[in-house]
């Protein structure tokens, strides 16, 4: 542990004093230092955890956006295919008209 050269006096509430006194260590000074060191380590760990969660959220957002875009494109493609199907059905009707004999009574006119 580092050499303790700083002498400070603090005023704290009863709630904070109780919290410090319940922390591990021998005496107020050691408990206070242990609490601060613990908080420093936890802060670093929590910052890393938050960054990892932010990264996961961003990745999930990108995946969700890609799925939405894919669904949108699929819906457009389906609409285009249905339109093409209707166009082909119309063409088939025209082809049947063209192939029909000119005189239904005389099939040799094809």
Image (cartoon, rainbow, N blue to C red):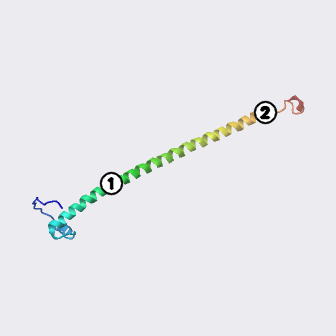
Q: Nearer the viewer, residue 3 or 89?
A: 3
Residue at the (68%, 36%) spot, across then down:
87
* 29 left or right, relative to 60: left
Which circle, 1 or 2, is nearer the viewer?
A: 1
Q: Is residue 62 depicted above or below 1 in this figure?
A: above
Where does residue 53 sit, x and y in percent of width and height? 37, 54
Label 1 vs 2, first from the N-terminus = 1
Q: Quadrant of the N terminus?
A: bottom left
Contact (Cβ within 8 Å) of mark 1 with mark 2: no
Q: In front here: 38 or 9?
A: 38
Estimate the x, y position of residue 71 in percent, counting from the top left. Answer: 54, 46
Give residue 7's position: percent from left, percent from top: 9, 60
Above or below residue 99? Residue 10 is below
Residue 24: mark:
none
Q: Is residue 13 above or below residue 78?
A: below
Q: Which numbered disc covers residue 97?
A: 2
Q: Where 77 sits versus 6, above or below?
A: above
**Residue 3: image location, x then y, percent:** 14, 60
**Residue at image coords 88%, 32%:** 107
Q: Which residue carries the number 1 mark?
A: 48
Q: Secondary structure at mark 2?
A: helix
Dot 2 crowding, Cα within 10 Å, few <14, some 14–19, many 20+ = few
Q: CA distance from mark 1 to mark 2?
A: 73 Å
């Amino acid at each position: 542990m580092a050499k303790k050269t700083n002498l400070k006096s603090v005023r704290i509430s009863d709630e904070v004093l109780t919290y410090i006194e319940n922390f591990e260590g021998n005496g107020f000074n050691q408990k206070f230092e242990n609490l601060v060191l613990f908080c420093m380590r936890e802060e670093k760990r929590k910052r890393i955890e938050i960054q990892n969660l932010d990264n996961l959220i961003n990745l999930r957002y990108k995946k969700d956006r890609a799925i939405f875009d894919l669904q949108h494109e699929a819906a457009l493609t389906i609409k285009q295919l249905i339109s093409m199907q209707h166009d082909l059905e119309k063409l088939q009707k025209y082809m049947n008209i063209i192939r029909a004999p000119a005189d239904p009574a005389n099939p040799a006119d094809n």
